[in-house]
Amino acid sequence: MSAPELSGLLGEIGSSPFYDEAPCGLVLTDGHGLFLGANATFLRWFGYELGELVGRQRFQELLSVGGKIFYQTHIGPLLEMQGSVAEVKFDIKQHDGQTLPILVNIVDRSSGHGKVRQIAVFIAEDRAKYEHELVLARDRAEDLRDQLTRAREVAEDRALFAEQMVAIVSHDLRNPLAAVLLGVDSVQMDAVTPRQQRLLAQMRAAANRASRLANDLLDFKQARVGGGIRVHPVPLDVHACTRGALAELRLAMPDRQLVHIEEGPAHQLADADRVTQFIGNLVGNANAYGDPTLPITVSSIGKANGFEIRVHNHGSPIPEHLLGKIFEPMTRGEQASEGIGLGLFIVSQIVNAHGGRMEVHSTRSEGTTFRGFFAAGEVAG
Amino acid sequence: MHALQRNNVQVLGDGAATLVFAHGFGCDQNMWRLVAPMFAARFRVVLFDLTGSGKSDPAAYDRKKYDSLHGYAEDLIEIIQATTEGPVIFVGHSVSAMIGVLAESRAPELFAAHIMIGPSPCYINDGDYEGGFSREDILSLLDTLSSNYLGWSSTMAPAIMGAPDRPELGEELTNSFCQADPEVAKQFARVTFLSDHRADVAKVTVPTLILQCSDDLIAPVTVGKFLHKAIPGSTLRVIDNIGHCPHLSAPEASVLAMEDFLVSLDPRRVSA
């Protein structure tokens, strides 16, 4: 642009106070951003003399390096394409080398003198501080989220490893335990002294307890990571099944009185081994926690739409704080010395797999009753 | 997801040879609106948006895949395979010139020639090599991108201020051009400006035009000269232009330089 053209253009703008003292920086450049003029506000804010800008500097050259790149990759093409941009945030270099955050609006217009660019500049220090805090807060939040995600992944890996380890060990323990029991049986035929007989009975009881524990751990793993305990329901006589379970239990606890009550229709659909296991776990608990001088009562109650197994014992009630989580794994009674707290978890998993539910009722006057409702209809598993 | 949808691929014109245009960091295929139509009479012209830019499928953006230019090079190969059989003349602006170099080294049979507009194999100064920027400069760009995060308002400017000299601009265009998810934009900026492909450019085997602007902050003349030396048999053409997008600000000169290069190519090599 020639000198007369330039002075003509600036003459059009005039030296009106509306321009010079406007409450924002106003800049006029050619189509490449080369300064043609700037108002007094702009010069005062950023410390420049008009003479060192006009015809010498491009507006974008006053920006931080990041701003210059952004101008080239985004703002330049946008101006070419749509002729204006608004609310763009930059850092501008002041005359003394300090930088200040600014917001700019830019419009390209064609004039008699070719393309001119009008730029309005606002200082945005407070907005920049606020945004900076927001960005920092967001970065911190993202860091924390990443840390949490990593910690959770590590914990899940460890838990999975531990559960698989438990399952493998439990599985591999069953064969040696079976061998021990077989050995005890065959030695018992030759045992003569009462002391030998007593020791062998203790060995059998210990090996049986270890087998139950191994089986419980396998069931636990199946319930936790295998999608639930598997059951294979078949038609059965629920009263006969309960009778059989109690006969076995009487052998294991000869000093205990076990009472069986039968009610309602006997023919039901259920997994006989699991029902036997269910009764065994509940009676085992009743034996461990109930009043040893009073009988344990097991009721098998046939109904039109399934059946109920009820196990009752006398004695101290289950503490209130345990009642709510009693079917969760690793919950143990206060005087428990045996087991790792899986018995009731497995009991509830067996009922769930039969499409039913558990209830527990425990008071000092009435004793403790566990009720398992086995559904007759669709069977899960 | 098919490459044609993922990268919003558009095909114009017809001809024996195919020109594939790839935009650079910042905007989308609309960057080619002034030059692409000039070739559509004699060539098949393929336009697309890099994944993460323009109207590409946002769901296709995978932070791992696009953590280097190789992810973009994979996309380019799929786009070429989906649109043509013969080798193409690849026109890459800025970072896309390097995407083309990486794609050629993986699938040389798909490339007949490169036209590189404002290319740079490395933006960071390194010893004697003058890329133009320091690492701190690039971090300051990431800051600028962050602080222009809220609302992407610059693209809404015509709605606020009017587009006085652009009555022909459709609203659709002004709302999408230069718009990208800010997190994607920051990762793309990092990948673009912190990458170093100086060793890769020596592997280019096809005729190459380096279209260098006389005054370009992003790809200075020294970088154009470096590339000319590094790419065997390349042509360096400097055009008089201030800025990094000559195809927008000096479309006639850009087309002229490209035409000169295209007529110098062996026609047997560039047609399917």
Image (cartoon, coloured by chain):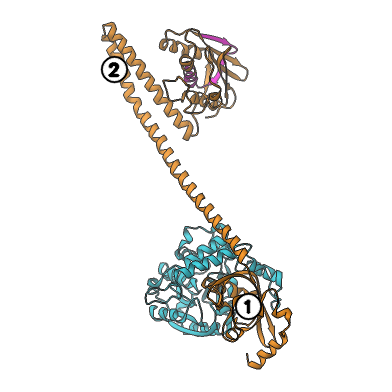
Does A330 sit above or below residue B86? above
Residue A127: x percent and y percent? Answer: 62, 63
Q: According to the colouring, which chain is cyan?
A: B
Could you classify mark 2 by the number of other residues whose Cα lies within 10 Å: few (under 14), some (14-19), or many (20 or more)?
A: few
Task: Say which chain is orange.
Answer: A
Q: Magenta region: which residues? A: A259-281
Q: Of the residues shown, which amino acid type is indicated by label 1?
A: Arg
Q: Tell me: B245 left or right of A255.
A: right
Residue B32 appears in which quarter of the rendering?
bottom right
Whether residue A277 is in magenta: the answer is yes
The x and y percentages for residue B91 are 51, 75
| Cα gap from disc 1 to disc 2, whole angstroms | 102 Å
Name which quarter of the figure residue A250 lies in: top left
Which residue in the protein does label 2 denote?
A: A183
The answer to which image quadrant residue A3 occupies is bottom right
Question: Which chain is indicated by disc 1?
Answer: A
Who is closer to the viewer here, A193 or B137? B137
Do marks 1 and 2 share a subunit? yes
Work out whether A164 lies above or below A75: above
Q: For this rendering, which residue is in front, A47 or B101?
A: A47
Q: In this orientation, which residue lies closer to the viewer: B174 or B125?
A: B125
- B54 over A325 or under it: above or below: below
Give SS at disc 2. helix
Q: What residue is shown with label 1?
A: A44
- Residue A213 image offset from top left, x and y in percent: 40, 24
